[in-house]
Image: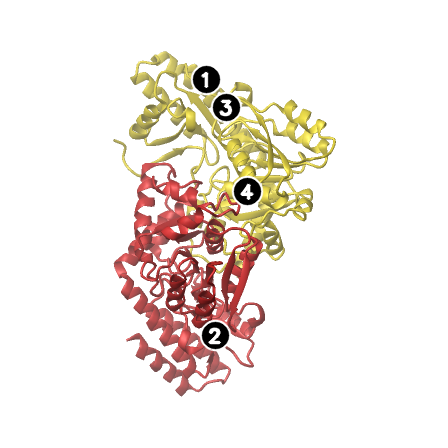
Chain colours: A yellow, B red
Amino acid sequence: MAIQQKLSLMIPGPTPVPEKVLHALSKHPIGHRSKEFQALVESTTKNLQWLHQTQNDVLTITGSGTAAMEAGIINTLSKGDKVICGENGKFGERWVKVAEEFGLEVIKINSQWGTPLNPEKFKELLEQDKQKEIKAVILTHSETSTGVINDLKTISSYISEHKTALSIVDCVTSLGACNVPVDEWNLDIVASGSQKGYMIPPGLSFISMSQKAWEAAENSNLPKFYLNLKSYRKSLRSNSNPYTPAVNLVFALDESLKMMREEGLENIFLRHTKHKLAISNAAKALNLELFASEKCLSPSITAIKTGEMDAEIFRKTIKNKFDILLAGGQDHLKGKIFRIGHLGYINDRDIITVLTAISNILLGMGKVTAQQAGEALLVANKYLE
Amino acid sequence: MAIQQKLSLMIPGPTPVPEKVLHALSKHPIGHRSKEFQALVESTTKNLQWLHQTQNDVLTITGSGTAAMEAGIINTLSKGDKVICGENGKFGERWVKVAEEFGLEVIKINSQWGTPLNPEKFKELLEQDKQKEIKAVILTHSETSTGVINDLKTISSYISEHKTALSIVDCVTSLGACNVPVDEWNLDIVASGSQKGYMIPPGLSFISMSQKAWEAAENSNLPKFYLNLKSYRKSLRSNSNPYTPAVNLVFALDESLKMMREEGLENIFLRHTKHKLAISNAAKALNLELFASEKCLSPSITAIKTGEMDAEIFRKTIKNKFDILLAGGQDHLKGKIFRIGHLGYINDRDIITVLTAISNILLGMGKVTAQQAGEALLVANKYLE
């Protein structure tokens, strides 16, 4: 049995939180209508724009990433609107459900779980739409359930060519892990959540809205109040919030965004790339099979097949023995894969630790030799240099 | 200029947070799908039921009190439904806006700001409704904007007699401050927020749903996803959440609910009553006029008129001199009143401190004599015994 209270979080969220962010979190709250809080809203908003590489409004909502995605959808669309939803995992499926709940007409573009969405299918549908009936394309950048990253850059270029359709993108596990240049890629609506690359606990979500998205909002007829983004935009003009925000999470956000600026976007992306390559290649050296196609591995999550081993038992063994929490498979993948979250506040030591823990269990089961375990480390080292 | 970082929060939220709750808040997050987190959901839910004095489901949402009120409305009603909204302050106004946004037909029962809603008006409308067209009565128990408490017990008894209509009640600044026996008063839907009597920072809200409310939910046709309470109920059956919850705020909630159980409901209510009486009577001894009718003073907020003095300047002076944050008046009351929040983690010392600070400013302005200032303290002491 592991000593309690020395948990290592290697799930795709909540992710580890730096000590100084935890300290910021535990400061005594202040009034959310005070000028001290206005200063925080101003600084976090500027840093959110930096992180999103955008001049667009970036709004902070108290709620999960799902709340932010729903806000993007219900603020810019109207009942009966035709939308394309990309669906190649659990989150893609969720956005279809949201769209259907609000009476949108959904055209699905599917791809098998573990494989990326084919951008050419988007191109085809968008080019065929001469009547400009398609109002939005809703998709997930990094599909947390499968560890696949979709080719957002190419898909969004096709959306831009369509001119009318908005892009509504779940960047929950890509923002702060890999390049998401909102302005350069013309992304209209980008949703993300605090417990991911942001390195703070869950409770806040973020939504970037382009000018085109705001224009669409003028015509949206779906009912909304708490998630009415116009209220947030109006309050933001005076660095405020329409409803009481999660003040202490904003303290934490301010601190973590400063840490991210110190590290710099390029370094953050490079770190995630190195970790992705170290984990995926070392896993192969351990005879483990990756769930996602190798050309589209998410920078934040690696999903690993366990073959005849029960992935849930494997996960529990690592938790009990080493107090490392890995994520399981969702829905039909439960027991078939485990997922390593490597986004946010993760350093090289965390990577070799999780790999060594995995090797150790496999060694104990006689699934790998000492030679293989050592070679897996060598492989990892190559990418961590 | 006051020394920085020794702020005393005397606003109606965020309210002061106990040290051990702040410590709980800054613990490292854990996985929200872990059995450790399930145990927290189980214990906080039981304690929430204790606080609400109910056997009903009490759901925890990541969002503000407004999100919880909206959830109550959109989960149980349908477009075109007729509802009564009680309106005697800023929050009453807000629930009218929510109801109208979702296409409900609103019958308003108004009362001037500072005066309570007249229960007999509710009785009359409900008795006249032989066709049972009124589907819900939406009202605010403690009106935070004016410091008035409405007679929820009587109004809810009339709603119960109607049989069909649901009660949807904003108890954001009453729950945890005065008696709100949900089962005894047959309250169907009760919304509250973490940054009030709960003594934790903002970010969580709570909603108690009666069996009758759940039955109404079966027929509701308003679109919702993030705030669809059926998803929360389903997850709660396995002590879980449909979307990633604000894990660290749940740590804080667990701690604060334990503190509340230790103190006991009767003691909590008595403490708030004593503080309300001490503040309101001492204010009168200082020649200050209460904004709310004296028979309906909220247990949590006292609104004070400043006559020819600008309330905003008065508030700023107390902030600069003593680092005590008071709330101002909202909308047309700005500059005319200030509001003292005395709910949650407030002890007798906080009460005499805020009174002394107010006396001090008034003394400096020559508005009261030393004799009066001393007598105001004597009056307060009488109620604090």
The image shows residue A4 at horizontal and vertical percentages of 28, 37
Q: Please name the residue that numbered disc 3 is placed on.
A: A113
Q: Please name the residue that numbered disc 4 is placed on.
A: A70
Q: Secondary structure at mark 4?
A: helix
Within 10 Å of the Cα at label 4, are there few (<14), some (14-19), or many (20+) other Cα atoms? Answer: many
Identify the image quadrant of the N terminus of chain A: top left
Q: Secondary structure at mark 2?
A: loop
Amino acid type at image mark 2:
Thr
Tell me, yes or no, whether the two marked residues, 4 and 2, touch with CB atoms within 8 Å.
no
Given this view, does label 3 or label 2 mark the residue nearer the observer? 2
Distance between the Cα atoms at labels 4 and 2? 39 Å
Badge 4 and badge 2 in a common chain: no
The image shows residue A296 at horizontal and vertical percentages of 55, 23
Amino acid type at image mark 4:
Glu
Q: Is residue A262 visible?
A: no
- Residue at mark 4: chain: A
Q: Please name the residue that numbered disc 2 is placed on.
A: B115
